[in-house]
Amino acid sequence: MPLRAKLLSQQQQPQLRTMASSSVAHFPPAPTDEPEDVLFQSLYGLRTIELNRPKKLNALNGSMIRKIGPRLLEWSKSDMANVVVMKGAGPRAFCAGGDVEQLAKWNKTSMNGTRRSATYFGQEYKLDHLIATYNKPYIAFMDGITMGGGVGLSIHAPFRIATERTMFAMPETTIGFFPDVGASFFLPRMEGFVGTYLALTSARLQGPNVFYAGVATHYLHSTSLNALESRLAELKFRDHDDLKTRLGVVNATIEEFVTGLPYDQPIALAGEVRKAIDRCFRHDSVGEIVKALERERERENPVTKGWAEETLETLHKRSPTSVHVTLKQMRIGAQWDIAETFRREHSIATKFMDYPDFNEGVSAVLIEKTHEPKWEPASLEEFAKEDRTELVDSFFLEGEGSKKLELLNGETYSEYPFANYGVPTEKEVEEKIAEGKAESRGEVVEYFVRARRQKQGVKELVSEILSRKTRDGEEGLVWVYEE
C-alpha cells in the first residue's frame, strides 16, 4: 500500500470506529431484522433509500429504522455523497406509517412489551431528528400513501415532493394515539388552525392539495420521478459550497421537472371552509371546538354546514383521550424547538403504550378490523362529564430524574431553516400587506410570483389568501384578522 494511502487509512480509522460505535449504540441490530426491507443504492453522487415492504404499504418497522439510521450517518460524513433521496417501493405508498400492529402485539403479549415499544419510538424519533437536522440535501418522494411514520421521514426535509398519488394524513386519533414524529412542531406551524384540524380529525389531503397546504414543497407527476433521480445523480458541488448553496441547486433542479398542477383539483382548504376551520379550531378546549362546530352547522351556508356536520361526526368517532391530549399538544408544541419536540413526544408516546386506547384502537382498526373500538372513556361527553383534566396533563408531565431521549446530535431550531422552497405562507403575505406599498391584489400576486421565480401554484395560492384575508381600504389593501 502506498505510504499516502496508508496514512489516510490510519487517519480515518478513529473516525470510522466512532461512527460505527455511535450507530450500534443508537441503532443496535436485532436477530429479527429482515434482510431486504430497505434497499440502498449509490449512483454517482446520489444515495437512494427505498422502503421495501410494498405489501405492508412500506410500514416502518424497527428493522428498517436500524438500517436507515447508520447509513444516513455514514453518508453525512462522506464527500462522495451529494444528495439523498428517500422513496417507497411500489405505486401505492411512500410509507403508510409505523408498524403499530407489532407494537400493540408486544404491549398485549410480552412481559416487556411496552418497554420494547418505547425503544422503537426512541429509535424512530432519533432518525426523524437526524433527518430534520441533516447536513446534506435530502429529498422525500411522497408518492402514494404518506401517513404517520412516513410523515416523520419526509415532513422535516427541505424538499418534499407530492404527486397525483399522494395521500397525506396524521391518523393517530383514529387508533387511540397522538400525532407524533415531530407533529408537535410542524402541525401548529401550519396556516391558521389547519394543523389543529388535521391533528384532531385525521383528515386527509390528496395530490396537489398536499402541495397547496405546504406539506409538500413541490408537485410533480409520478412519471417524472425516475428522470429526476437520474438528473440528481449528475449534480456536482464545489468543495466550498455550503448547505444553502447546495440546496439552491437541488431546488432549481427539481423545478426543471414540474409539469403543472391539475386544473380539476382546486385548493380544498380554501374560501368558506378554510374560514370555518379557523373559526372552530382556534379554541383551546375540545368542548368549545364542538360548540363552534354545532354553531357552524346551524349557519345558512350549505358548504360549511355540510363540512361541520361531517367534522362533528368524525370527532365523535375518535378516541376522546387522544383528541384531548392532541389539542393540548397543538397548543404547547408550538413553543418547543425541534430537539425538544422529539424528546417530549417520546415521553408522551411511552405513556400511551400503558393506556388502553392504543391497543384497543389498533386492534379494532388494523388487526380485527371491526372499526368499533371501545374507548376509555367511551365518548367526548363522558370525558367532559368525568373531568379528565388531570389525565390529559399526566401525558405531558416529566418525572424527576426521568431519562430524556438522547438524540444523535445537538442541532436544533425553532423554525424550519429552509421553508422558502415551498409556497408562500399567509404570514409572508400579511407582512407584504403591512408594508402598505401594494395598491392592488394583482400587485401582491405579481410580487410573490417573481420572488418565487415563477413557481407553479404561487399565483393561485396567493390569490386565495388575498380574497379571504384582505379588503380594500382608503390607502390600499387591509389585512382582515378576524371575522
Image (cartoon, rainbow, N blue to C red):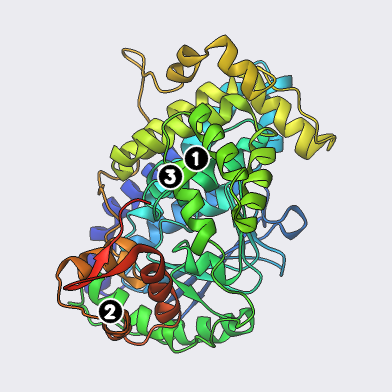
Q: Amino acid at mark 3?
A: Gly
Q: Nearer the viewer, residue 420 or 64?
A: 420
Q: Amino acid at mark 2?
A: Val
* Residue that appears at 41% across and 23% down: 396
Q: Quadrant of the N terminus?
A: bottom left
Q: Is residue 235 left or right of residue 303?
A: left
* Residue that appears at 42% across and 58% down: 72
Q: Where is residue 407 drawn, in percent x and y?
A: 35, 39
Q: Is residue 309 left or right of residue 407?
A: right
Kindly identify which residue carries mark 2.
Answer: 444
Secondary structure beneath dot 3 equals loop
* Residue that appears at 67% across and 51% down: 306
Q: Nearer the viewer, residue 471 or 102?
A: 471
Q: Nearer the viewer, residue 420 or 483?
A: 483
Residue 338 location, quadrant: top left
- Looking at marks 2 and 3 on the same chain, the residue that comes earlier in the sequence is marked by 3
Measure the C-alpha gap from mark 2 to mark 1: 36 Å
Measure the C-alpha gap from mark 1 to mark 3: 5 Å
Kindly identify which residue carries mark 1.
Answer: 180
> Does 16 appear above or below 229?
above
* Residue that appears at 67% across and 32% down: 316
